[in-house]
Amino acid sequence: QVQLVESGGGLVQAGGSLRLSCAASGRTFSFYDMGWFRQAPGKEREFVARIRSGGSTYYADSVKGRFTISRDNAKNTVYLQMNSLKPEDTAVYYCAAQLYKSISYDYWGQGAQVTVSS
């Protein structure tokens, strides 16, 4: 069982920055692929960013150039640095873990609210 706990959400003005953190339990964190997703009110959950166990990163077009995903395997933590925030980035942000050889994300955090005011 893997537990994921997000932190770092909050209220920020448009153009500002926030950094989300996701702390994971388990001794094999370095083998997990990790992802960030978000869900805005009335909308479906959408992909934001992904970092593979080897460090490769992928981003949704809507956040490319503004958001950066990174990981610290020594701290069992994945980060999402969000810059140049826009009101449309307002959502609950979830981190997720995909275990080795799994075909989908296996574990999800409880979510962190990010609100961007105009």
Image (spheres, helix red, strand yellow):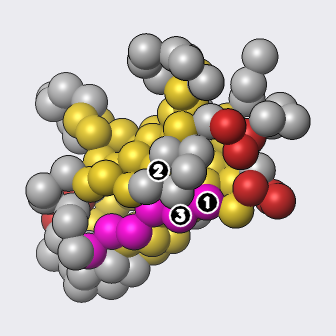
Q: Is residue 64 left or right of residue 6?
A: left
Q: Residue at x 73, y 29 (%)?
A: 3
CB contact under 8 Å: marks 3 and 2:
yes
Contact check, label 2 and label 1, Cβ < 8 Å: yes
Mark found first going from the N terminus, 3 or 2: 2
User: What amino acid type should be assigned to the residue bearing mark 1?
Assistant: Arg
Sort mark 1 into few (<14), some (14-19) or many (20+) by Cα contacts within 10 Å: many
Residue in front for this viewpoint, 104 or 8: 104
Which residue appears farthest toward the right when viewing the image? Answer: 27
Q: Is mark 1 on a helix, strand or loop?
A: strand
Q: How far apart are marks 3 and 2 (CA)?
A: 7 Å
Residues tagged 1 and 3 counted as in contact (Cβ below 8 A): yes
Tell me the number on the disc at residue 51. 2
User: What residue is pinned by disc 1?
Assistant: 71
- The front one of 35 and 109 is 35
Residue 54, horizontal then vertical, whole percent: 56, 51
User: Is 22 situated left or right of 111 in this image?
Assistant: right
Magenta-drawn stretch, dominant element (helix, strand or loop): strand
The residue to which callout 3 is attached is: 70
Q: Which residue is located at x 33 percent, y 68 percent?
A: 67
Q: Name the quadrant containing residue 78.
A: bottom right
Q: In front: 102, or 61?
A: 102
Decide whether residue 69 is among the magenta residues: yes
Query: What span is in magenta?
Result: 66-71
